């Protein structure tokens, strides 16, 4: 199967994903505060993610590209929404365009539509330094995501099987790229052990992309004659993964993604120590089932939800949410009691 056809398959299956029974953010509660001494108009969504200054804590996380005209239209509309709402945008894996120049247009459209926006490039951990540079230059990216997707590759019928030099490749890229390098998962979360390994090779930006959102085990299983269903529930839930990474590498910059549903989930992620939160599947479904105007309205609604949480906790900037009173329950409490 061609890479382009596979990209379109991923979109189709992701749009029809099953909802998980329990989202990890439902096992975390912020302790309500009845008094606040701030004015709504003084609340700012301006966010600092390491070297990156963002107008919003929310960004459109990596989804698509490399599927020809269909994915070009999707990326164009995502870029329009990002520009109108002032949020950053990450493109999907650019390996298809690196291997086939005809696919470049489906990525470059985001910079054309949003010339002054913050845009993240995206490559797989199999990429070389030269390929990483190509990805950044292709869209004049402000940062580079390197995605880790071992389980997805193993379940994918045509996936990779050799991961012996991935950490060394990541280290080489960090040394030769002059924009922030973000290592992200694709729905399985990051452990404290993984975070420490990555920190040792120079990574300071982590997108945990935990279990709870688009499940690529299920997506790839739908493309198999004999599915590996045993791995459909594999992964570290997003809220738990944030806690693990921050506990093991406290100085790092953490991005929350993986099943983020609303602005309150985003605020909870900030309480745990995240500095930004990404949404992919929810925004894609909104765009595909409605239109770009509805997507813009939904992003503004998520911003409003985030600001309500800030107001309730008496903070005027997202970073001040960190460590606000909260409790854990259920699986999350049991996990953190044993791991941290």
Image (tube, rainbow, N blue to C red):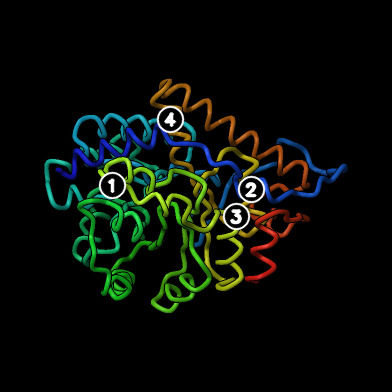
Q: Which residue is mark 3?
A: 239
Along the viewing direction, whichever of 34 and 157 lies nearer the viewer? 157
Look at mark 2 in the image and give the residue it sits on. 25
**Label 4 CA crowd tier, 10 Å (few <14, some 14–19, many 20+):** some
- Do the CB atoms of the residues marked 4 and 2 lie less than 8 Å apart? no
The residue depicted at 36 percent of the width and 54 percent of the height is 142
Query: x and y percent of residue 305 in the render?
Result: 65, 35
**If you read the primary sequence from the N terminus, does the residue marked by circle 3 or circle 4 appear first?**
3
Q: Is residue 211 left or right of residue 1?
A: right
Q: Quote the CA–CA distance across marks 1 and 4.
A: 28 Å
Q: Quarter of the image holding residue 263?
A: top right
Vertical placement of residue 332 versus 258, above or below: below
Foreground mark, 1 or 4?
1
Label 4 SS: helix
Q: Which residue sits at x=51%, y=67%?
A: 191
Residue 264 position within the rendered picture, expressed as x and y whole percent measured from the top left:
65, 41
| C-alpha gap between disc 1 and disc 3 | 32 Å
Mark closer to the chain start, 1 or 4: 1
């Amino acid at each position: 199967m061609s890479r382009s056809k596979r990209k379109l398959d991923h979109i189709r299956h992701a749009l029809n994903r099953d909802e998980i029974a329990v989202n990890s953010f439902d096992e975390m509660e912020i302790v309500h505060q009845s008094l606040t001494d701030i004015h709504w108009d003084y609340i700012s969504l301006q966010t600092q993610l390491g070297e990156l200054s963002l107008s919003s804590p929310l960004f459109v996380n990596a989804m698509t590209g490399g599927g020809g005209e269909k994915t070009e239209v999707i990326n164009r509309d995502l870029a329009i929404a990002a520009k109108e709402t002032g949020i950053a945008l990450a493109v999907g894996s650019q390996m298809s365009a690196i291997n086939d120049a005809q696919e470049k247009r489906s990525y470059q459209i985001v910079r054309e539509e949003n010339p002054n926006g913050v845009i993240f490039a995206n490559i797989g951990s199999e990429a070389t330094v030269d390929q990483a540079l190509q990805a950044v230059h292709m869209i004049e990216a402000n940062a580079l995501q390197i995605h880790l997707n071992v389980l997805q590759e193993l379940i994918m019928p045509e996936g990779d099987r050799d991961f012996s030099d991935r950490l060394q490749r990541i280290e080489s890229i960090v040394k030769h790229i002059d924009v922030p390098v973000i290592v992200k998962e694709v729905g399985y979360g990051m452990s404290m052990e993984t975070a420490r390994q990555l920190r040792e090779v120079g990574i300071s930006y982590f997108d945990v992309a935990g279990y709870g959102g688009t499940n690529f085990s299920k997506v790839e299983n739908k493309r198999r004659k004999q599915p590996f269903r045993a791995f459909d529930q594999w992964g570290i839930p997003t809220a738990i993964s944030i806690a693990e990474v921050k506990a093991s590498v406290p100085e790092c910059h953490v991005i929350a993604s993986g099943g983020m549903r609303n602005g309150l989930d985003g605020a909870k992620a900030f309480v745990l120590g995240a500095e930004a939160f990404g949404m992919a599947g929810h925004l894609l479904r909104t765009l595909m089932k409605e239109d770009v105007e509805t997507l813009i309205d939904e992003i503004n609604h998520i911003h409003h939800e985030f600001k309500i949480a800030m107001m309730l906790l008496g903070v005027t900037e997202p970073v001040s949410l960190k460590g606000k009173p909260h409790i854990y329950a259920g699986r999350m409490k049991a996990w953190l009691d044993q791991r941290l």
